[in-house]
Image (spheres, rainbow, N blue to C red):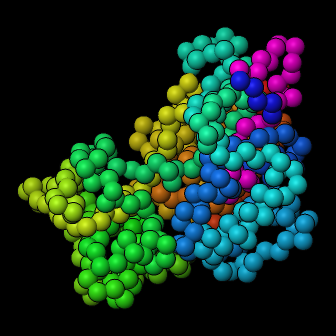
Amino acid sequence: MTLLDLTPRVTEADSLSTLPVAIIGAGPIGLAAAANLRERGIDFEIFEAGDSAASSVRSWGHTRLFSPWKHLVDPASRRLLEATGWELPDPDRAPSGKELVEKYVAPLSEVDGIASRIRTGVTVVGVSRQGMDRTRTHGRSSAPFVLRLRTSGGSEEDAVARAVIDASGTYRSPNSLSSSGLELLGLSEIAEHVTPALPDVLGRDRSRFAGKHVTVVGAGHSAANTLLALVKLAREEAGTEVSWLIRNAQAVRVSSSPDDALIGRADLGSRVDRAVERGEVTLVDGFEIIRARRVAERVELVGHRNGEVVTHSSDIVVNATGFRPDLSMLREIRLDLDDIVEAPRRLAPLIDPNVHSCGTVEPHGFRELTHPEKCFFIVGMKSYGRAPTFLLATGYEQVRSVAAWLAGDTTSAVNVELVLPATGVCSTDAGAGAGAGGGCCS
């Protein structure tokens, strides 16, 4: 992809098929998209904000995944890696995030034909159409995409593409600590006392938590992992206290379930339950945070509980409230998102967290990920919006389907199959109802 100070102009005489597909994010899903496109002979360029592939995964690399290796490797990526002599690790063992990167993602990012197409230290701050904002319709689908890039050095430039696959994830855009969803009042006062989800409590960040009263806010598995690490730290470091704030009466997302097909996930919930019963974790339920303030060197959270205004004080707050998609860079793109979970509208009913766990989501592909903006797709964790039910295997099938559609292989694009821990092999044939014209801007 040629990068200039001004946006490269693509004339009507040029074929958009000569332009690459832009992939935003070099995590497991972004690289899987690249592997599928490479197999189909479609050029691509990957833009990664971090200084290396899977920079977000590296941030929580100390955390063990629930899924075993056999569900964590994309088939197209595996074919490319095995051609270099790579071997799949123990298929029934669940790796840590660090192992996932070192034994799979990093080697994949170094494969011939992928390594040369990755630009690290480049953040995509905006996506649009060449010469058009979102209000202009005439000639829109035949115009190339324009991506505004910001380098780690602060310079900006534009690049053009025939299609865009946004696999940027959600780890860098957490939900608010405020129960209203708005930015927490007083956050600026306590910012230095707040850490993002999944800190390395027993390793890199140990000195920050040892001997402190730590409050974990959130009712999901990220919160549970951090709570258990803090319990272990408290046994080793005198003065360490652990509190757990949730806004509901029960943390249903981490509650034990004997029929959970992901053993590690079920065990996580049981261990947290036992820690609460033993008094190693103080559970404060029904606490709706409305503001925060700094009192000396401590944090005071103010909220509603049982109809009264109450306060909770601690030294450090861990924001484990979940994540949301950062849609700011897509303001000039025509999206069709569900009003509640901010996922593509056709996908939202399939991933509703009130109904589904990650193991009960039906197979889906390009059709469910389609937006009014032709040739634009949000995939991976970001495609799930605010729903915390994502599995890597789901994202791999998403990008396989999208790549097939971009290549004009509609038959392959609409036939999706997914192997999930809870359900085995799921498949669906979207048939003729999926629509024609699988190729994108060709």
Which is nearer the eye, 262 or 177? Answer: 177
Task: Tell me if I can see residue 69 in this picture.
Answer: yes
Which residue occupies 58% across, 17% down? 133
Span highlighted in magenta in the image: 6-32
Question: Which quadrant of the figure has residue 132?
Answer: top right
Q: Quadrant of residue 1?
A: top right
**Image: 268 above or below 312:** below
Q: Does the magenta run of residues contain 26? A: yes
Residue reaching furthest to the left = 308
Q: Position of residue 409 (x, y in %)?
A: 84, 40
Q: Residue at x 35, y 73 (%)?
A: 209
- Tag count: 0
> Which of 35/415 is in front?
35
Left or right of 435, for residue 228: left
From this viewpoint, which residue is outermost toward the top? 138
Image: 291 above or below 103: above
Q: Is residue 225 magenta?
A: no
Could you tell me if residue 67 is visible in this image? no
| Residue at 61% over, 57% down | 55
Q: Is residue 8 left or right of residue 24?
A: right
Going 64% across and 66% down the picture, which residue do you hit? 420
